[in-house]
Amino acid sequence: MQFNQTLESIKTYEAGKPIELVVREFGIAPEAIVKLASNENPYGCSLHVSQAVSHILSKMARYPDDSMYKLKAALAKRYDVGAHQVIIGSGSDQVIEFAVHAKASASRPVLMNSITFAMYEIYAKHVGAPVVRTTSRHHDLEAFYALYEQHHPSIIFICTPNNPTGDAIDAAELIAFLEKIDGDTLVIVDGAYMEYGRTKDAAKALEVSSLVARFANVLYLGTFSKAYGLGGMRVGYGIASAPIIEALYKLRPPFNITTLSLEAATVALEDDAFIEHSVLKNFEQMARYEAFAKARGFSYIDSYTNFITLCFDAPLNGTAIAQKLLSRGMIVRDLAGYGLNAIRVTIGLPEENDRFFELFDLVLKD
Ligand SMILES: *Cc1c(COP(=O)(O)O)cnc(C)c1O
């Protein structure tokens, strides 16, 4: 069968390998597997979530509240914007999809960092939009601006902190950049790891309400999948000026968020103490990875997220290391597909990190 030609250039997104797959492929018991590959919160989620969700289990015969009133109101309050400036997606992935479908087309390229979240390109390809990338590893906003002037992109993706490198942009620098961009270019600012980044360095924190008030062409994205520990619930959101949200709404399928997910996200948003605790523990444990890398003479990228990217020089090879770790039940992310001799490791629980260090040393001796 012939499918749309746009599909030919799309590589299927490879999510972090699920534990179940490693059980089947390597015959390792599930308890012996450690997954540090998808930047999930190892501390789970707020304890209030499971209580709240269990209370509404009897409501599953009904469609969810499609107005998403409670969650939108909670997000609007949190970010100090109007509820009409919020859209909820099945993961922020879905909001990216809406935005790309709403704005991008084959006639203008989409601009993004050399190394960044792989889904941006996949969604661009849905609509046949060419992709233009900068060349440096970190977001270089001067290079972005030069490419913007040259290509007049429909969308600019800014991922801060960036996945899979973990670096982040200073808010002041981003604002100076946005001032130079015309109103017909949609700038998508993906803050999937912002709960981590803003805690590590206040200079990276974005004032979302003033950002979207000042720049009517900016769409800010957040997710419940990372710090909030609700990856399995699939809830993310976009915040922007009303015209952007109205455009995105036209692409939204009805009931795109389940009743359970809406409840979980609403309750999770109230528990600041859980986020604070998770972020604190994250950076405590990250320091161990930094010390580990230094002691063994390889580098890492200073990270504002809940993962760290360890970079190798030949003869050390990230792909081989990831593979050998996997055969011992340790799932990490090989970044060869991004052109890096590196692996990305989600910061786990202390005992998971112990296990990583132990297995890594074993693998180095191989
Ligand atoms: C994880 C992630 C997302 C979205 O995750 P969802 O689970 O779809 O909300 C978006 N952007 C980046 C950079 C991410 O790492």
Image (spheres, rainbow, N blue to C red):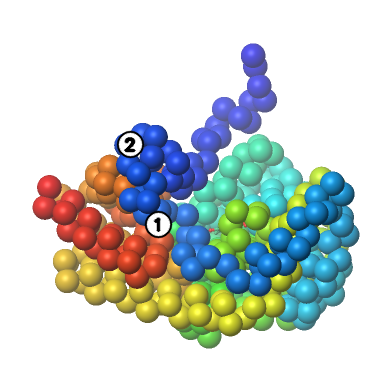
Q: Quadrant of ligand 1?
A: bottom right
Residue 302 in the image, given as x and y percentages of width and height: 37, 72
Inspect the image, locate mark 1, and give the three-letter code of the amino acid beneath it.
Leu
What residue is rendered at 71% in x and 58% in y?
261
Q: Between residues 47 and 238, which one lies in front from this camera angle?
A: 47
**Displayed quadrant of residue 238:** bottom right
Q: Between residues 63 and 239, which one lies in front from this camera angle?
A: 63
Q: Which residue is mark 2?
A: 27
What residue is rendered at 62% in x and 81% in y?
272
Taking 175 as reference, is 343 above or below it?
above
Q: Between residues 50 and 347, which one lies in front from this camera angle?
A: 50
- Label 1 – label 2 distance at C-alpha: 19 Å
Q: Residues within 10 Å of mark 2 (few under 14, many from 20)?
A: few
Taking 264 as reference, is 114 above or below it?
above
Taking 189 as reference, is 4 above or below it?
above
Q: Is residue 146 rendered to the left or right of residue 222? A: left
